[in-house]
Image (cartoon, grey):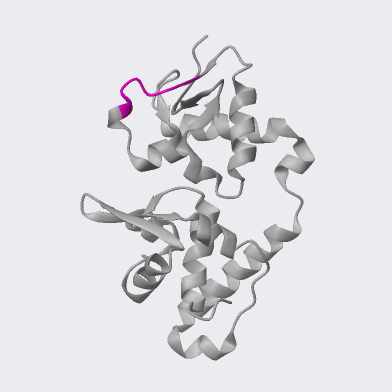
Amino acid sequence: MAGDLTPTDYAFLILLQIEGREISNKELDTAYGVRLIGDSYARLNGLGYVDSQKVGSTYHHTLSKTGTKLLGGQIAEDRSDKGKSNGREQQLWAALSALHNAQLDRPRVAAVNGHRGLEERIRAAYAELTTEPGAWVSLSRLRPRFADVSKDDLDKALERLLDSPDVELEPEDNQKTLKVEERRAAVRIGGENRHLLSIGLR
C-alpha cells in the first residue's frame, strides 16, 4: 500500500472504483453503511486520489485518474496499520481488497466480448443518466462510470457508436458555457470536440 494511506482509505478507493461514477455520501451510507468524511476525506482529496464536491447539503465523490492508476495493481493489507481502524473497517477493507485483487485476475470484459461489450456498457450507462430516449447527456457525466477503461478506448467506442442510426455526438452550441471538466471529457471526431451524447432516436 502507499505509505500515506490507511486500509480504510484504500477501502474507499475500491468502493469508488466499483461504483465507477460520482457517488454521494448519502448513497455510500445507504449502500455500504459508510461515508467519506474526516481524515480519509482530507487525505484522499489532498493527495489527489479522489475528487469531491459539495452538491446541496452533501458531498459527492469520484475516483480520480491518479486514484485509478493507484489501483492498477494488486494490493496487500499492511497489518501495521490496524491500530488506526476499527474492526468493522478492517473487515470492510479485507473484503474489498480481496474483491479488487480477484477482479484484476479476471480477463477484461472487452477482451472476452470484443468492442460490443463496451458499447453495450455505454448504452446502459446512458440509460441510467436519462429519463427519456434521445435526451442530451454531457460526456462529463458519462466518463466517471468508466474508470476501468482508458480514455482512448472509450473515445474509440463512442466513435464506433456513431455508426448506429440512433446515436448522435455533437459539440456544445455555446462553447462559452463549457466547464473545465466538460472540455476535458470531450471526444474529438472529425476535427471537432464533441461534448453531448444522444441515444434512442432514429
Query: x, y percentage for residue 54?
Result: 26, 54
The region drawn magenta spans 169-175
Q: How many marks?
A: 0
Query: x, y percentage for residue 140?
Result: 42, 38
> Is 174 covered by the magenta stretch?
yes
Query: x, y percentage for residue 72?
Result: 64, 61
Kindly indicate the quadrant of the structure image that contains residue 117.
top right
The residue sitting at 51% across, 60% down in the picture is: 66
The residue at the far front in this view is 191
Q: Nearer the viewer, residue 71 or 117?
A: 71
The residue sitting at 61% across, 80% down in the picture is: 77
**Is residue 47 in view?**
yes
Kindly indicate the quadrant of the structure image that contains residue 151.
top right
Q: Is 99 left or right of 40, judged from the image as shown?
A: right
Query: x, y percentage for residue 193?
Result: 47, 27
The residue at the far top in this view is 202
The image shows residue 114, relative to residue 39, as above or below, that is above
Assign the N terminus to one quadrant of the image.
bottom right
